[in-house]
């Protein structure tokens, strides 16, 4: 068995000997520095690849200060203020931290700012407002009791991630790192030269780990240095007049700040993306990939590898966008928060290898009294492992202060076990893929494949009460023997269902969001195409408010397909006679209650072909429906749990009309799953529970084995 | 103390002696028959007023059968059917009970029916469909995978209330009573003649109790004789080509069936009423009141009183409409389901007296094994009593089979107690009104005063999980020392707030409904008027989704006034730092948890002037906000309970900025309330709990008395 390789460890100046000890113990073949740590010179000759974190947009305050007009910028929106008379003064920086952001007073406000009457949605003409530099306020001629906002440009005078790390680690003396905009010609030239120089000065570094390229995701702090706004997918800090003028030329229409600030929602992923925002993403992808390629080429010209960190300044790289492969990266590394974010990395094409940084990060917010780094590492691995079995990372690693990890009793043992299992998987799969069900499942939303494994999220694997019952669907899918596509409503209209590969469509989200689909559901082509697809034998799985848009007597526009609708009060006068009948293929393995998470209230079954499997009082929660030759399944919510994985797996086979295929490879206990490698004739049976479990293994529909599994065990079986 | 009067008892053919005994025991001064019972001749000479139930639209099958074209009609909408090819046949009567309804094949379908493509909302041209009488189907040329409905006219061949009573009481031999449309000239003439004849033939009857006039609220049964659709406020069964042609002439535009079937929602009260539906109501009110007056005049001409039952065929009478008083009725009687429905009756102007029929109705669905008629009577009285103290009925009564009541052990004692308290109230108030707070509270919705005390309801006091957290607001108000107005958005725009009488506005309901207000909240005039009102010292109380309409960055359009908004996912990226601080005037009396009923999820406080009094995890449930000189209060829901009454009362005084006024008359225990009659210097202190309670009585801000109250007691105190 492999004892070495596929593992990257962080190090630091004061950790030379411990690094070497752990490198041997864990079989690490790569070492790295991190934000706030330093690679000791003594280790540069160690028998391992050396990664160096490289920041293109910061760690050069001298340059930033010398070129203040090329500091990175961000579109901000002021507080909404209600006018009480005919004049209103709005203080722009109220609610923002002035150590992070500074109003851009260099570029013409009348050209780049926008004052909007939010009571009518109308733009206030530029002769109706003035910016007062002395007070930092905008004075507006107003209509009493209308609300106003000012959208304006600000310089990012403290890099948001540096600020975050600074605050989280309670750094004291480190100077605030300013940012600069690599897209602008002067800085671009400087940064390229600097990269060349750096490559020359660091002959022992094998891998330049870009952290990252040019634009930080939106991360803004408030006056109390608390996080104010964070969107991992946000483009609000990827702007400058230089970029926007280029955008105007490219796109052929006039830019408006509203394209970016978006009523103050800043184009959160939950917003149905506007045409203009999609245009802007497209433009940024083109430009960022071009410039990133130039950086990568420089790295290659010095015989080094170029690796990109999927995070921080990743905006515009869009790893599932059509320009990503052009960058020519050797590798992508990203943080593995769960199965979904693991797949977000491991599914990336156009690089030689992928690396996942497992959690926890060795930072004092977890390695502290009351913290549970071992528990976090185990939970993280349980979620990552089942997803890795479907789509493996090539490498794993850790980040932060190695000292914290090495001093935490038992933690090194835990990661030694993790690394061992990771290597086992690679040894047993021998580069082949695990068995997948003989059909594809498509997740349908407004983002599609561009945001593969990113749906329903706010910020990289962060739990929100509003989303966990949807994220669970993806988390379940991330480790299933199911080939998952992410498709858009445009894809539906362009005939993606025609070739018959996709057998089941999943639509999962709240009404009005990009994930449910909003007005797309009153697009005649969309609904007729899906109805025909299901009628002819396809499957449709809806979670939460699928196909929701109040129109012509229905809230769920596919209520005929789903067999359910949501009571929006308008049909309270219509009697429902919903009764539960839980006897169904989907629930055959399930003993206890089904967890619908936050659930969805007011769902009722309707039509003549439904069966209600679960109810909450008079409301239905899990409903199946037949529609012609096809089937649908409705879930009120589906947070991640091993049991819900099993329910969804069965629901998918039911929806696909392929119940008979399910036990081709199968384990009975809901806390267990299996991955089958037909090439090597090996089966991994995993126990996703922290307790021991018994399970029966089925191969080709027949029980072949009974297994007693230790807590969290991964057992390899030959067949 | 009064021992007699103000009470009506039902009787029946076999109950002569028992009726007389109970009449004496309870001091009844009126006797009545009911649907399915008969007034015995022996009682016609009894010392009491005799009411006779009179049906204008039924109990004359001979006439109905002889004039089939003048049978009442109802607009029905077929099932929604998805076309799978270019032709679709929809069987109209599928899902309806053919003993109740029969397709109108007399009037031209192409003139009066409508086939609608519900996938596009477009009307299918009449040359694209045909009605096939032989099968009862409509054949439509369709677009595959579009959904279609047929709106059509049907004759009501079994009166819905007769059918309901028939089914509920398991009548066997009674012939189904057909209906007829009194609005049509032939039937109108017949019915008037018949009424005259009836008056002549019933010299001993004092009161003609119309049950009711001409049009039944919408009540439709399905194939299994189960209720299919019921809307107490519904106009769908008030139509006929005769009426609709008159309507077209009156209104000046072409009628469409869609005005009535309304996408299948049948203009449920929750729908924001369309202009066309409001026009239709106006037309019906004019016509119904005119014709009803003619009937009343006939009754009067025979020296009898005319009483209207507020229910059954009450459609078009609209007791708070501007034509009601013209009818010239002597009295209105209605069913008292709770405090709200009590006020719906007792607040009616334009009649000499009002009568409330208390619950339970003496029907075998309650007077049966497992039934609890005494409990129901007590609950009913507790709710009615506190409302009667604010706006008294003149009389009370009961309905159904007297035999069931008299044979139920203890039931007669219960109603004897109720009747005694009712008479006590009248004796002590001496025709005066109870003390009211020195300001008005306005409930704001799309219906306003036309549907006073009818808001948020589906069917007269029927509990629904979706509405009880809103109905509770009205139920609390129904018994409060608060003068309540019901106003529309038009009233707001027309300056109803200008005279300063209204100090607090309440907006309570789900987004999109007539009760929250939907698009009215993006009406600039509405929001600026209310903002100005609150800024200048007014109060605004929001329950559920007040001012909700997603627009320009906010879901609650008055989020600035309310200090809260609802997280519709778009602002998940924005950090909230909501913390609870329950120390507030509003909660001073409250010890335990606050019950928000179904509540409202995802509410967060925002702005700078809020205080969060209750939270559910990270969501806020009860929030106060200051706005200029004014105040607002947000409730996630407010089901009825004595505790919630107290919280709302305090919230109102807080919102009005009149906290100091509250203890002018006050009792401390939340389960107790008081009504003060300044004219007679008497105070009723009521215990709304079924257990004994202690409470302190405050008069003019000073504690004057400590009271020990028996369960449910009403104690009279002089001051």
Image: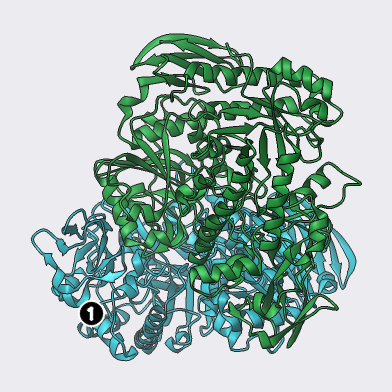
Chain colours: A cyan, B green
Q: Toward the viewer: B109 or A318?
A: B109
| Label 1 crowd (10 A; few <14 / some 14-19 / many >=20) | some
Q: Relative to the observer, which residue lies in front, A260 or A556?
A: A556
The answer to whether B463 appears left or right of B101 in the picture is left
For the N terminus of chain A, the image quarter is bottom right
Q: Is residue A608 visible?
A: no
The residue that disc 1 covers is A241
Subunit that carries the residue with mark 1: A
Q: Position of residue B558 (x, y in %)?
A: 36, 53
**Which corner quadrant holds the C terminus of chain A?**
bottom right
Is B104 left or right of B533, judged from the image as shown?
right
Answer above or below: position of B538 versus B15: below
Picture coordinates of residue A163 (x, y %)?
30, 59
- Taking A673 as reference, is A593 above or below it? above
Quarter where residue A548 is shown = bottom right
Q: Nearer the viewer, residue B717 or B316?
A: B316
Q: Can the viewer see residue B33 in this picture?
A: yes
Between B277 and B306, the one lying in front of the other is B306
Please tell me which residue is depicted at 30% across the width and 25% down the height of the picture. Answer: B660
Question: Looking at the image, how many numbered discs can be counted on the residues?
Answer: 1
Compared to residue B221, the image places residue B368 above or below, namely above
* Residue at x-position 53% and y-position 83%: A352
For numbered disc 1, what is the local secondary structure?
Answer: helix
Residue at (39, 20) in percent of width and height: B665
Residue A501, position as x, y percentages in the image: 70, 84
The vertical placement of A187 against A467, above or below, is below
Q: Position of residue A288 (x, y in %)?
A: 36, 83
């Amino acid at each position: 068995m492999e004892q070495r390789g596929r593992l990257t460890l962080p190090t630091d100046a004061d950790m030379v000997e411990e690094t070497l000890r752990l490198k041997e113990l864990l079989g690490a073949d790569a070492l790295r520095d991190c934000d706030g740590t330093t690679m000791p010179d003594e280790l540069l000759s160690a028998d391992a690849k050396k990664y160096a974190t490289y920041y293109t947009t910061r760690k050069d305050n001298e340059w930033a200060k010398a070129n203040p007009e090329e500091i990175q910028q961000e579109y901000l929106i002021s507080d909404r203020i209600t006018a009480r008379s005919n004049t209103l003064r709005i203080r722009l920086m109220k609610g923002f931290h002035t150590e992070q952001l500074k109003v851009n007073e260099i570029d013409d406000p009348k050209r780049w700012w926008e004052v909007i009457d939010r009571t009518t949605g109308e733009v206030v003409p530029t002769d109706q407002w003035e910016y007062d530099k002395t007070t930092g306020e905008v004075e507006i001629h107003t209509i009493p009791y209308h609300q106003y906002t000012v959208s304006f440009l600000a310089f990012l005078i403290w890099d948001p991630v540096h600020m975050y790390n600074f605050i989280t680690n309670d750094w004291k003396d480190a100077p605030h790192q300013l940012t600069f905009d690599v897209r602008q010609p002067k800085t671009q030239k400087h940064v390229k030269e600097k990269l060349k120089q750096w490559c020359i000065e660091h002959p022992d570094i094998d891998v330049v780990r870009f952290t990252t390229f040019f634009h930080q995701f939106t991360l803004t702090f408030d006056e109390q240095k608390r996080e104010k706004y964070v969107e991992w997918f946000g483009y609000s800090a990827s702007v400058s007049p230089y970029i926007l003028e280029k955008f105007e030329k490219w796109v052929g229409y006039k830019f408006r700040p509203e394209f970016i600030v978006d009523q103050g929602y800043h184009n959160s992923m939950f917003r149905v993306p506007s045409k203009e925002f999609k245009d802007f993403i497209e433009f940024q992808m083109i430009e960022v990939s071009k410039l990133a390629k130039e950086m990568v080429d420089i790295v290659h010209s010095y015989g080094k590898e170029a690796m990109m960190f999927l995070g921080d300044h990743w905006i515009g790289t869009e790893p599932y966008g059509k320009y990503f492969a052009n960058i020519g990266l050797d590798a992508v590394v990203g943080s593995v928060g769960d199965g979904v974010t693991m797949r977000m990395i491991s599914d990336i094409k156009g690089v030689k290898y992928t690396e996942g940084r497992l959690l926890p990060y060795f930072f004092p917010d977890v390695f502290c009294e009351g913290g549970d780094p071992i528990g976090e590492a185990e939970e993280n691995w349980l979620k990552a492992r089942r997803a890795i079995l479907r789509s493996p990372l090539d490498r794993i690693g850790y980040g932060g202060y190695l000292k914290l990890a090495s001093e935490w009793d038992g933690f090194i043992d835990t990661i030694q076990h993790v690394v061992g299992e990771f290597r086992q998987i690679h040894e047993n799969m021998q580069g082949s893929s695990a068995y997948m069900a003989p059909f594809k499942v498509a997740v349908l939303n407004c983002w599609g494949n561009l945001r593969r494994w990113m749906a329903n999220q706010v910020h990289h694997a962060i739990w929100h009460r509003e989303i966990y019952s949807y994220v669970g669907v993806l988390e379940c899918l991330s480790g299933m023997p199911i080939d998952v596509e992410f498709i858009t409503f445009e894809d539906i209209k362009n005939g993606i269902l025609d070739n018959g590969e996709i057998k089941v469509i999943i639509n999962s989200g709240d009404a009005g969001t990009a994930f449910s689909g909003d007005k797309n559901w009153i697009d005649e082509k969309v609904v007729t195409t899906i109805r025909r697809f299901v009628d002819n034998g396809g499957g449709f799985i809806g979670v939460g408010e699928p196909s929701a848009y109040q129109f012509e007597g229905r809230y769920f526009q596919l209520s005929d397909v789903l067999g359910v609708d949501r009571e929006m009060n308008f049909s309270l006068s219509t009697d429902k006679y919903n009764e539960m009948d839980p006897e169904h293929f989907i629930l055959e393995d399930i003993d206890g209650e089904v967890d619908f998470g936050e659930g969805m209230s007011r769902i009722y079954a309707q039509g003549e072909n439904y069966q209600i499997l679960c109810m909450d009082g008079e409301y239905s929660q899990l409903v199946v429906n037949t529609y012609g030759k096809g089937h649908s399944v409705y879930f009120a919510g589906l947070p991640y749990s091993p049991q819900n994985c099993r329910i969804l797996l069965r629901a998918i086979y039911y929806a696909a009309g392929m119940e008979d295929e399910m036990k081709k490879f199968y384990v009975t206990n809901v806390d267990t799953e299996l991955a089958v490698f037909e090439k090597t004739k090996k089966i991994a049976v995993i126990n996703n529970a922290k307790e021991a479990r018994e399970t029966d293994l089925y191969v080709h529909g027949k029980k072949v084995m009974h297994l007693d599994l230790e807590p969290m065990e991964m057992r390899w079986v030959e067949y």
